[in-house]
Each structure stands twice: as structure tokens, then as C-alpha cells.
Image (cartoon, grey):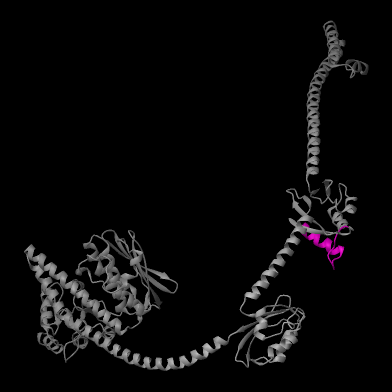
């Protein structure tokens, strides 16, 4: 079988020859199988194995042919790649050689890979040891010991190597000095794979040119400095670190009267000092010996200032200061004229002070008279406003009652206009009264809760905004601030009223906001806005942006009151506005600690079965002004309320005792003449008959009245009385 196998497959024959042999054998075996019987079965099995072997040989031969083909193609591509690499290497070498600077490349392992002929051409002993594979550290070590390297003084090769390796750790460009006054610029640039490219450029000519140009510039600067010194009106002298004169100007010689032979380069300071002290004395805290010691000391010197007064009357101011090279410079200024002028000014000042004192006394007297006149004017305005508010309140209430009762549209319109006119007069008088109080600077700073104040303002201005078709949004706030409650209310009334008055459509927003340690109350509107050039003028009295506005819309006192009140209360007032986009006024207040709610009671009714309930209510009205009393009664009676009118507190107490019926609510004027005051009357009624909803009516806005009402927990309705405010109080007592 071994001989048959060797004959079947001869590795030296080609595949076609081996196939032909196998086909011949297969044909012979097939004939034997067809003729043979049982003993020849073994031969047939051998034939089957030979056929299987032939199939495997054919498959292996096919795989081998495919592998040989791929190997041949790969070898061809590899050969082409090698040729391309070689061409690239030659091109790179040619390009590096064409570079005018010295070029070398070290790989990421700090080994020299390639370099051109110009690299280290100025360091021939280093050039001799260059070869691919040279470590960078060995290259630097060889450079440090090269006889062509110009090491600086006091620097060893080891020091140079340490500095060079320090630069090697980062991208750097530096100069290296060579012997013979030659210079190399070395640039090291890292590559992306961690290698290093080193470029060497001969910059000898550039450095020499710079040195020459620098010398020329220094000469020019020296001439410029010399010319500058000669044009200075001060005497200047410059000394080096050894105290020798190195520079001066002609003005110095003229001021000190120094001979030309003395002023020369190298003259010591001691020589010049004799001419400084000649015919003169030092004025100040320094002696001649201390000046000489200052000039020759080696430690850092502090600036020196002194005066020299000469026998001729000339006064020189001397200023000396150390220079960077440890020398010093001295300047001498002739201040004789200034000193004479100062003396003349002192004499004039003494005379002027006497005149100013006399004028000051005159002004003090005039100021006292003006303050007295201003105080009298303020008291007059307050008194006149108070006296006018009484009949004005009555007139308003009468007109309001007549307007509501009339059925004639024409008469109703006329009464409505009259009511508006009276309201305008009321606003003007109120503003004048506020201004008079501001002039007196009478304020009372105390904690003020914003919640009830904002609620009152909402109730007050919501109807006004609705009549104009505006949306009034007032954000709630539960904080407490430091302010004068009456002035703060007046400030916000003016700001909100102005916003509604000047806004034709849209909305008005009142928004308290927390700030660092305080509260800022902002009033936004969608009105026409205020031009920048008018934003300062609107705070002047009687100034209005809309010159065509009628007097019913105010006389321009609201913002003047706001500004003066904020200044008096130390509240910061700001304004931000853009024409066509609306306006925002804001006041900033200091936050106060929260305190128990309510300085005033809500005024809820207390039922005792004597009156009230579902039947008619009874109001006790105590007012000493007859017309105002009748006007209030008329307004209350229109609401179905029975009014008991009296003119004094004593009459009120007697009337309630005689009737035996306790009224449902009290309206009491504070100023009732010589008898009981309004608060005293209320206290007596509450003591005898129990609490009832009550209001004090007054035109007096003094802090004492407000504090007394707050202590008694009674709210105030100020004159002139607003019918809506009065009706709101009555409505809450149902």
C-alpha cells in the first residue's frame, strides 16, 4: 500500500498528472469489482478509501492554490508599499535637507531619528557624535561641553544642562550664545505622538543689528533727556551709586550760584552740599549731617523733602529720591513767589474770615427769620386747609345726596360735575396740607403692616380702575416695614392714583417684592410712559406731562409730595419708564419684625338685642359743624339708617341714656369744642354701653391724633369725607 500511495501522489508532478493517474487506477479497480466476488471486497474498500483520499487531495490543492494567489498579491502590494515608503523617506530627507535651519527629530523614546546637514554645524564637536539612536540627554550633555558654546559667567555645564532640560519639557524658543559673539535661536516643538522637533537658526546678524539699534536709541534718549533737563524750570542733579555727579542742567547752576568749574562729571555730593548750604539754612526735620548720611548710605533710601531759605529771601524746595541703580536724583524748585503769594493770601484770608463771620451772622439772622416765616406759612396753610375742609366735606356730601336723588338727567350731570369739581378742590387742599406737614418735617417712624394697608388701597382704587376699564392687580404681602403709616399710605395713593389716571387701557399692577433686608413696592402701568428728559421734571410742584389736562386731574403736586415724603422717611424712590411701554415707580423700605396684627379694630357690630339685627340700624353722629352733620345724616338716611345727631360728646352721652337704646354704630368728630374730645366720647360710650363699630372723623393729620386712635384701636376717616369710604364703613357694619 505504501508503494501504491507513493505512486498515486507524486509531489513533483503537476496536479493534472496526478489526476490522470487516479482516474486510470479508478477505472482498473472498477473493472475488478465488477468481476470479483467476495475475496475481492477488500480491494473494493481500498478503492473507496482511495476515492475519498483523492477528493481531499483535490480540496487541499484548491485551497493551496487560493492561498498562493493571495500571498502573491500581498507580496506585490507589500513591495509597492515599500517602494512608496522609500520614495517618501527620500522626499522627506530631501525636504529636511532643503530647510535653511538646522533640523533634528527625536522620537517619543527621546532617540535621534533623523537630522539634516545644518544641524549643529556651528558645534562641530557635537556634530561629530550625531547618529540615529543618540539619546536626547546625551545630545544636550555634548552641547554643554562643546568648546564652541559661550557659557554665561558663573554658570557651569551642569547648570546649563539643567536649564536646557527644563525648557525641553514644554514648547519653547530661546537663544544660545556661541563663542565669537555668535547666536543660535533654538526652537523645540513637540509632535502629536510624543516626539520632539528641534530647529536651530543663526540669528547672529539680527542680534547684532538690534544691539546697534539699541545703542543708537540709547544715544538718542540721552540727548533727549539732556534737552528735557535743560527745558525744565527746576534745577536737577543726578548722582550714581557712589555719590558722584553724572548729570545736571543749567538751571541748577543758576539756582545755587555754583561756578562752572565745580559742576563737572564725577564731582562728589559733599562738594555740591557745601554750595547747597552756603548762605542759607535748612528748614524741616533734617540736619546737614543727616542729609550727607542719606546720600552716602547703601541701604534703600526713603524719599527726602526739605526747604532751603537763603539770606536773599529765595526759598528753594528740594526733593530727593533713589534711582533704580541705587543712585539718587535731586530737584530744586524756586517757590519764592508761591510763598509770598501764600503770605498775601493768609493776610487776605484773615480779613476775609472776619467779613465771612459778619456775613454768616447776618445770614443766620435772615435764615431764622425765613424759618419763622416758613413755619408761619406752613401753619397758615394747615389751618386754612383744615377750615376749608369742613364746609367742603359738607358740600360734597350734599351734592352726592342730591345727585343720587335727582331723576333729571341734565341736573344729575350738572351735580356730577359739581361733585367732581369739589373732589378736585379736596385733592388740592389735601396736597397743600401734606406739603405743609412735609415742610415741618413731622414724621413718626414705626412698624407698619402692609397687609391691611394694601387691602384698604385695593378697596379704594378698584372702583376707580373699573370706571376706566382698567384691570387693577394688587399682590398681597404679609410683611411689616418701618415707615410713617400716614405718609406711606399717601405715597402709595399718589402712585396708584397717577398710574390709573394716566393709563388709558391695559392694567395697573402693585407688587411688593422682598429684597435683601427690606421690601420694594413697585407700581407698574401700561400707560404712555415718561420720556427720559421729563423724568426729573415730573417731581416738581405743579408740573404735568399732559399740559391739556384739566384741574380735575390734579395740579401736579402728587409726585412732588411722593419725592419729598420718601426723602423725609429715607425711603429710596426709583423710576423706570420707556415711552409707549409704560412706567414703574418703586419705593424701598426697611423690613421690621412682625408684630401682633392690627393697630385698629375691624369695627364689627356687637348685638345686645337693643337694636340692629334685621331691622333698621341706628347711627350716632357727633359733629359740631352743623352743615357737615346734616350732609352726613342725609347720606346715611338714604341707606335706610336712622341718624341721631348731636353737636357734642356730652349731648351724645345724655341722648343715649335718655333713649335707653344703644346705636349700632358711632361716627364721632375728634374736635368737638371745649368739652369732651371724640376719643373721650367713644371711650365713655364703650364703657357704659359696650363696644360698637366706630370711626373718628377729623381733618387733623398730626401724629398725636393718629397715635391716640391707634392706641384706642379706632380707625380714622379724614376730612373731606369721601362718600365711598363712609358707605364702605356702613356696609361692613351690617
Whether the magenta-drawn stretch holds residue 89 is answered as no
Residue 622 visible? The answer is: yes
User: Foreground: 291 or 91?
Assistant: 291
Is the residue 275 above or below the residue 167 in the image? below
User: With 639 as the anchor, is 539 left or right in this view?
Assistant: right
Q: Residue furthest front?
A: 260
Which quarter shows the C terminus? bottom left
Across and down, in percent, residue 289 comes to 72, 91
In the rendered image, is residue 475 in sight? no
Residue 359: image location, x then y, percent:
37, 91
Q: Quadrant of residue 414?
A: bottom left
Left or right: residue 607 compared with residue 283? left
Look at the picture and state if 24 lies above or below 723: above
Residue 323: x and y, percent? 70, 77
Quarter of image, res 43: top right
Question: What span is colored magenta in the figure?
Answer: 148-170
Name which quarter of the figure residue 1 lies in. Answer: top right
Please state the total of marks drawn on the protein image: 0
Amino acid at each position: 500500500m505504501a508503494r501504491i500511495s507513493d505512486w498515486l501522489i507524486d509531489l513533483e508532478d503537476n496536479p493534472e498528472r496526478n489526476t490522470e493517474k487516479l482516474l486510470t487506477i479508478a477505472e482498473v479497480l472498477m473493472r475488478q469489482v465488477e468481476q470479483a466476488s467476495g475475496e475481492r471486497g477488500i480491494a473494493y474498500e481500498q478503492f473507496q478509501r482511495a476515492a475519498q483520499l483523492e477528493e481531499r487531495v483535490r480540496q487541499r490543492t484548491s485551497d493551496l492554490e487560493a492561498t498562493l494567489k493571495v500571498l502573491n498579491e500581498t507580496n506585490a502590494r507589500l513591495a509597492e508599499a515599500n517602494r512608496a515608503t522609500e520614495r517618501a523617506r527620500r522626499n522627506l530627507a530631501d525636504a529636511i535637507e532643503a530647510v535653511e535651519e538646522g533640523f533634528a527629530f527625536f522620537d517619543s523614546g527621546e532617540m535621534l531619528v533623523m537630522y539634516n546637514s545644518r544641524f549643529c554645524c556651528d558645534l562641530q564637536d557635537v556634530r561629530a557624535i550625531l547618529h540615529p539612536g543618540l539619546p536626547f540627554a546625551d545630545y544636550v550633555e555634548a552641547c554643554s561641553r562643546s568648546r564652541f558654546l559661550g557659557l554665561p559667567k558663573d554658570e557651569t555645564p551642569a547648570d546649563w544642562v539643567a536649564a536646557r532640560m527644563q525648557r525641553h519639557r514644554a514648547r519653547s524658543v530661546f537663544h544660545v550664545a556661541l563663542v565669537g559673539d555668535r547666536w543660535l535661536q533654538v526652537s523645540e516643538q513637540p509632535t502629536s505622538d510624543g516626539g520632539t522637533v528641534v530647529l536651530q537658526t543663526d540669528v547672529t546678524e539680527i542680534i547684532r543689528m538690534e544691539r546697534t539699534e539699541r545703542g543708537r536709541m540709547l544715544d538718542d534718549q540721552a540727548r533727549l533727556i539732556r534737552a528735557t533737563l535743560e527745558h525744565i524750570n527746576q534745577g536737577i542733579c543726578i548722582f550714581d551709586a557712589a555719590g558722584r555727579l553724572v548729570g545736571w542742567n543749567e538751571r541748577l547752576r543758576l539756582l545755587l550760584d555754583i561756578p562752572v568749574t565745580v559742576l563737572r562729571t564725577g564731582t562728589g555730593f559733599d562738594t555740591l552740599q557745601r554750595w547747597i548750604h552756603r548762605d542759607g539754612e535748612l528748614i524741616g526735620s533734617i540736619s546737614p549731617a543727616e542729609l550727607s548720611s542719606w546720600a552716602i548710605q547703601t541701604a534703600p533710601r526713603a524719599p527726602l523733602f526739605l526747604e532751603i531759605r537763603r539770606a536773599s529771601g529765595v526759598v528753594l524746595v528740594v526733593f530727593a529720591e533713589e534711582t533704580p541703580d541705587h543712585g539718587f536724583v535731586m530737584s530744586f524748585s524756586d517757590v519764592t513767589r508761591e510763598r509770598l503769594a501764600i503770605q498775601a493770601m493768609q493776610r487776605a484770608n484773615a480779613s476775609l474770615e472776619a467779613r465771612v463771620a459778619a456775613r454768616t451772622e447776618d445770614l443766620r439772622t435772615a435764615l431764622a427769620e425765613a424759618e419763622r416765616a416758613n413755619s408761619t406759612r406752613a401753619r397758615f396753610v394747615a389751618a386754612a386747609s383744615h377750615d376749608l375742609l369742613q364746609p367742603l366735606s359738607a358740600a360734597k356730601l350734599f351734592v352726592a345726596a342730591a345727585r343720587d336723588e335727582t331723576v333729571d338727567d341734565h341736573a344729575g350731570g350738572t351735580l356730577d360735575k359739581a361733585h367732581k369739581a369739589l373732589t378736585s378742590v379736596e385733592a388740592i387742599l389735601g396736597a397743600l396740607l401734606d406739603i405743609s406737614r412735609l415742610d415741618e418735617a413731622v414724621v413718626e417712624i414705626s412698624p407698619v403692616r402692609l397687609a391691611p394697608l394694601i387691602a384698604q388701597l385695593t378697596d379704594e382704587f378698584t372702583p376707580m380702575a373699573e370706571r376706566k376699564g382698567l384691570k387693577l392687580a394688587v399682590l398681597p404681602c404679609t410683611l411689616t416695614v418701618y415707615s410713617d403709616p400716614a405718609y406711606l399710605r399717601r405715597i402709595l395713593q399718589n402712585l396708584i392714583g397717577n398710574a390709573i389716571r394716566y393709563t388709558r387701557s391695559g392694567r395697573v399692577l402693585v407688587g411688593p417684592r422682598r429684597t435683601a433686608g427690606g421690601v420694594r413696592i413697585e407700581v407698574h402701568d401700561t400707560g404712555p410712559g415718561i420720556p427720559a428728559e421729563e423724568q426729573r421734571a415730573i417731581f416738581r410742584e405743579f408740573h404735568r406731562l399732559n399740559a391739556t389736562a384739566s384741574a380735575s386731574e390734579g395740579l401736579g403736586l402728587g409726585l412732588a409730595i411722593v419725592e419729598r415724603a420718601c426723602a423725609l422717611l429715607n425711603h429710596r424712590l426709583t423710576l423706570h419708564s420707556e415711552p409707549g411701554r409704560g412706567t414703574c415707580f418703586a419705593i424701598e423700605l426697611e423690613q421690621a419684625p412682625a408684630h401682633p396684627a392690627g393697630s385698629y379694630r375691624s369695627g364689627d357690630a356687637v348685638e345686645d338685642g337693643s337694636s340692629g339685627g334685621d331691622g333698621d340700624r341706628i347711627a350716632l353722629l357727633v359733629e359740631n359743624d352743623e352743615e357737615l352733620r346734616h350732609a352726613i345724616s342725609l347720606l346715611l338716611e338714604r341707606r335706610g339708617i336712622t341718624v341721631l345727631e348731636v353737636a357734642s360728646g356730652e349731648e351724645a352721652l345724655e341722648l343715649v341714656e335718655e333713649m335707653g337704646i344703644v346705636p349700632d354704630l358711632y361716627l364721632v368728630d375728634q374736635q368737638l369744642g371745649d368739652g369732651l374730645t371724640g376719643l373721650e366720647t367713644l371711650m365713655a360710650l364703650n364703657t357704659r354701653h359696650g363696644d360698637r363699630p366706630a370711626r373718628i372723623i377729623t381733618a387733623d393729620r398730626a401724629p398725636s391724633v393718629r397715635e391716640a386712635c391707634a392706641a384706642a384701636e379706632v380707625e380714622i376717616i379724614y376730612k373731606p369725607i369721601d362718600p365711598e369710604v363712609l358707605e364702605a364703613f356702613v356696609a361692613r357694619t351690617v
